[in-house]
Amino acid sequence: MKILLVITKSEIGGAQVFLLNLAKMLKEFGYQVEVAGGEGDYLKDELNRLGIKFHYIKSLKRNVSVFNHLTFSFDLYNLLAKNLYDIVHLNSSNTLMGIFAIKFLSHKPKTVFTFHGLSLVDKDSGANKYLKFFAYLYFKYFLKFVERTVFVSEINYSEAIKDKIVKDGSVIYNGLNLAQGDFYDKDISRSYFSNLLNYDFSDCFMLGSTGRLAYQKNYEFLIENFNLIKKLFPPAKLIIIGEGPNRELYDSQINKYGLEKDIFLVGALKESYKYIKSFDVFVLPSRYEGLSISIIEALFAGIPILATDVGGNSEIVDKNSNQLYKLNDVEDFLENLKWITQNSVSIIENNNNRKSSFDSLEMVKQYEAIYKSLLKTN
């Protein structure tokens, strides 16, 4: 079986970690796997290290552009025409336009599309009603030509059914293959941040997060309310690992609130999960999510989590464990943060019991079953 995995961006991110794990394990299963993607070096470098072929598609970008979409379809057509793939697995909304290219091939591979969140059609995406309506029509039309649609959370699947974006689909949770030995211990990771940022973090109460500095992740909530957090926890510090288009905005807000010695944006780190045991609590204030890889990483690291009750977050952590709060509700956030610090042992025990739902081997087996079932329909 020859499989092509396609993704919009090749930079460090949750969907890219998912795709890398999927490609790696499919290769270990004995399949011929290749990856196509847009800008970014992370995937290319990691795949090269694993001996997996990567195809760079310049026209594949994270924007809404008819020209780019059409150019991408043409570029993908040329790639598919030269390579007789059995399966083309599309990931992220902008890759869905690739279905248009497949329609014109004489050899038509079977197609799978994975929703890594509902993107512009999510109720909290911030898109205006016209853009949302366009996105709805886009998904509604192109998904008709996809043979199997996969969602990473039950709630995304339910919302897509309710909004009549799809008639059916499958839910496969993102999976990881991590053990305690894959994480640096608290002292080592804090020492790393102390050296990197020229600040002594040894005795602080550290909140931390990993994610793109973008609208979706909503880090302005933490910045704007950090002085309230400090009233409850005077030694509190916040480290955010990641890069993105809102970097300048967040730097400006940090300066505005006088938080230069309290909040630190460290940029993107390769294998950022290795450092998260330095956090006393992992926080994620997202406006919307599919199934957050970074929260799953925190689950495997064995640290308490405090995240917004959006998307599939309630499918990762127990909804009754006080690790979820209402979007942009600072009182709910502070109340749950206080509870978490007083009950961290029981929270970690509860989280440990949920790890098996996010096993990478099980994830890959489920995708393998979909690929095989599609090829049987020939």
Image: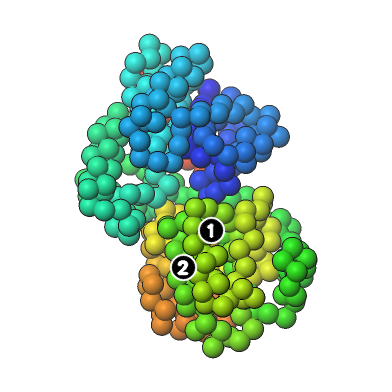
Q: Position of residue 306 (x, y in %)?
A: 50, 71
The residue wearing badge 2 is 220
Q: CB under 8 Å between callouts 1 and 2?
A: no
Q: Residue at x 51, y 74 (%)?
A: 256
Answer yes or no: is residue 346 visible. no
Horizontally, is 211 left or right of 205 in the view?
left
The residue that label 1 is drawn on is: 247
Judge whether 23 appears above or below 119 on screen.
above
Q: Which type of secondary structure does the marked residue at label 1 adopt?
A: helix
Amino acid residing under circle 1 = Arg
Residue 71 appears in the picture as rendered:
yes
Quarter of image, res 327: bottom left
**Residue 288 at what x, y percent from top left?**
39, 59
Looking at the rendered image, the quarter that the C terminus falls into is top left
- Residue 284 vs residue 363, the one in the foreground: 284
Q: Residues within 10 Å of mark 1 (few under 14, many from 20)?
A: some
Q: Residues within 10 Å of mark 2 (few under 14, many from 20)?
A: some
Q: What count of labels does the image hold? A: 2
Residue found at x 54% / y 71%: 254
**Colour treatment of the image:** rainbow
Element carrying mark 2: helix
Mark 2 residue type: Glu
